[in-house]
Image (spheres, rainbow, N blue to C red):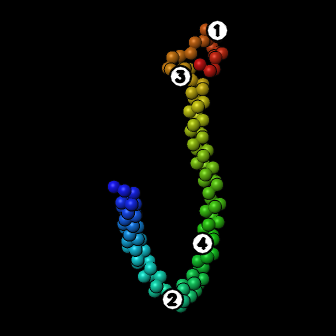
Amino acid sequence: MNIYYWLRYLILALFKALLRLLRAVKTKFGDFWLFCRCLTWSTLKEVCMKAGEQRLPGLSAEMAYNSMLALFPGLLAILSAIFTKFCSIAVGLFWSNERGDGRPRSNSSNPGYSNSIFC
């Protein structure tokens, strides 16, 4: 076995893979290509005229503007809800009367006042 055999084998394998890829592209985009061949200038002109009559550009601009206006307050509400939940959990753990391992804290110096906040 020499290098030319392996090189020939590699080229044939790559060529087969390329043919498979081209067949897949042809089947996926074949109908789209047929659609594009049927378009004429009169069809494109009619589509543009109908879009203008139905105020399509203005309505799409309104949708984009309103969605951008609603994005930041919605994101703020979601983040505040998440942080409120996590902060309540953290505060509850911080002021709890137990250590991390489940044992109660020792209050030997003053039973009514916890002098050790951190475990």
Classed neighbour count for the residue bearing mark 1: other residues with Cα under 10 Å, few (<14), some (14–19), many (≥20): few
The residue tagged 3 is 100
Residue at position x 63%, y 49% in the image: 76
Which comes before the other along the chain, label 4 or label 2?
2
Residue at position x 60%, y 68% in the image: 63
Q: Secondary structure at mark 2?
A: loop
Mark toward the viewer: 2 or 3: 2
- The spot of residue 80 in percent (x, y) is 61, 44
Q: From the viewer's side, name the closer residue of 26 and 57.
A: 26
The residue tagged 1 is 109
Which comes before the other along the chain, label 4 or label 3?
4
Q: Answer whether labels 2 and 1 touch (C-beta < 8 Å).
A: no
Q: Amino acid at mark 4?
A: Ser
Residue 109 falls in image quadrant: top right
Q: From the viewer's side, name the closer residue of 104 and 100.
A: 100
**How many angstroms separate mark 2 from mark 3 (CA)?**
74 Å
Q: Left or right: 31 with respect to 115?
A: left
Outermost bottom residue: 42
Mark toward the viewer: 1 or 4: 4
The residue tagged 2 is 40
Q: Amino acid at mark 1?
A: Ser
**How many angstroms separate mark 4 from mark 3 (CA)?**
55 Å
Q: Answer whether labels 4 and 2 touch (C-beta < 8 Å).
A: no
Mark toward the viewer: 4 or 2: 2
Q: Which mark is residue 60?
A: 4
Residue at position x 64%, y 17% in the image: 116
**How many angstroms separate mark 2 from mark 1 (CA)?**
91 Å
